[in-house]
Image: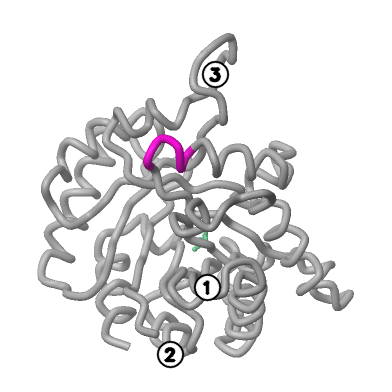
Amino acid sequence: MARRAFFCGNWKLNGSIAESLALATDVRNGVASVRDVDVAVAPSFTALHAVAKRLEDGPVMVAAQDCFWEEKGAFTGEVAPSQLADAGCKLVILGHSERRQLFGELDAAVNLKTRAALRAGLTPIICIGETLTERDAGETLGRIQAQLDGALADMTDAELEGIVIAYEPVWAIGTGRNATPAQAQEVHHFIRTRLATRAPALAPKLRILYGGSMKPDNVRALMAEEDVDGGLVGGASLSAESFIRLVKEGSAS
Ligand code: PEP
């Protein structure tokens, strides 16, 4: 089953509005001629609307880095999925390991956020991944299963159809140490098999991205694996030159 490659740059807590606009514009221009690939960038909240306006009608989509699960009310500091859609977002990254580790986000919250995002018409990119301690203890697949099942609890097939999964081993994020293609494939295949127990017809169609020190020079080998469908890219997405090169290399695989 051919799945369309998808690369999303996660800019994390970086960039003024002007810097985000400049980076987004360079990315848009650089990937304009690349075929058969979906590309998104995820700026900080403050730059979302301006970047979405700049990228309007172009091939590059805008993602937020988080959202809340309620639509309105007394939730100081939170942002609703419909507000993100209103700002021009098409996707939202959920359950990133930094949110889990630094802000105590649990699978149940990821589940609520995922369903709320879908109700607002956003595509959730659900991040799951094991720590180095879990990998060393042989607990990788158990951890992945628990996070996946928790994030997708009680979701219907119609809901599942709208999701993207990102496998991001925590030990590979921002460390310069990517998972080997074989390590990534083992987990991606496990995720797809697990998805198939929930929704057999859908599982072959769902995209599973790899995240964790993906770079222009390792993307081809990762993308050559059967179940690796793209990337969630942190550090290498902060320079237009490296992100464009990564998208080109990754979509040529
Ligand atoms: C990420 O933050 O999702 C990520 C994968 O970061 P990096 O590419 O820098 O490892």
The residue that disc 2 covers is 224
Place of residue 56 in the rendered image (x, y in percent of width and height, measured from the top left)? 15, 43
Q: Amino acid at mark 3?
A: Gly
Circles 3 and 1: CB distance less than 8 Å?
Answer: no
Place of residue 123 in the rendered image (x, y in percent of width and height, measured from the top left)? 41, 49
Image quadrant where one finds the N terminus: bottom left
Task: Classify residue 13 as left or right of residue 155.
Answer: left
Residue visible at 47% across and 39% down in the picture: 117
Task: Name the image quarter holding residue 137.
Answer: bottom right
Place of residue 100 in the rendered image (x, y in percent of width and height, measured from the top left)? 69, 45
Circles 2 and 1: CB distance less than 8 Å?
Answer: no
Snapshot colouring:
one colour
120 drawn magenta: yes
Between 159 and 39, the one nearer to me in the picture? 159
Q: Main secondary structure of the magenta part?
A: helix
**What is the residue that sits farthest to the right in this orientation?**
137
The label nearer to you, 3 versus 1, is: 1
The residue that disc 3 covers is 77
Badge 3 marks a residue whose secondary structure is loop
Q: Earlier in the sequence, mark 3 or mark 1?
A: 3
Between 171 and 1, the one nearer to me in the picture? 1
Q: Amino acid at mark 1?
A: Ala
* Numbered label attached to residue 203: 1
Badge 2 marks a residue whose secondary structure is loop
Mark 1 CB lies closer than 8 A to ligand 1:
no
Alpha carbon of mark 3 to alpha carbon of mark 1: how far? 36 Å
Q: How many marks?
A: 3
- The residues colored magenta run 117-121
140 drawn magenta: no
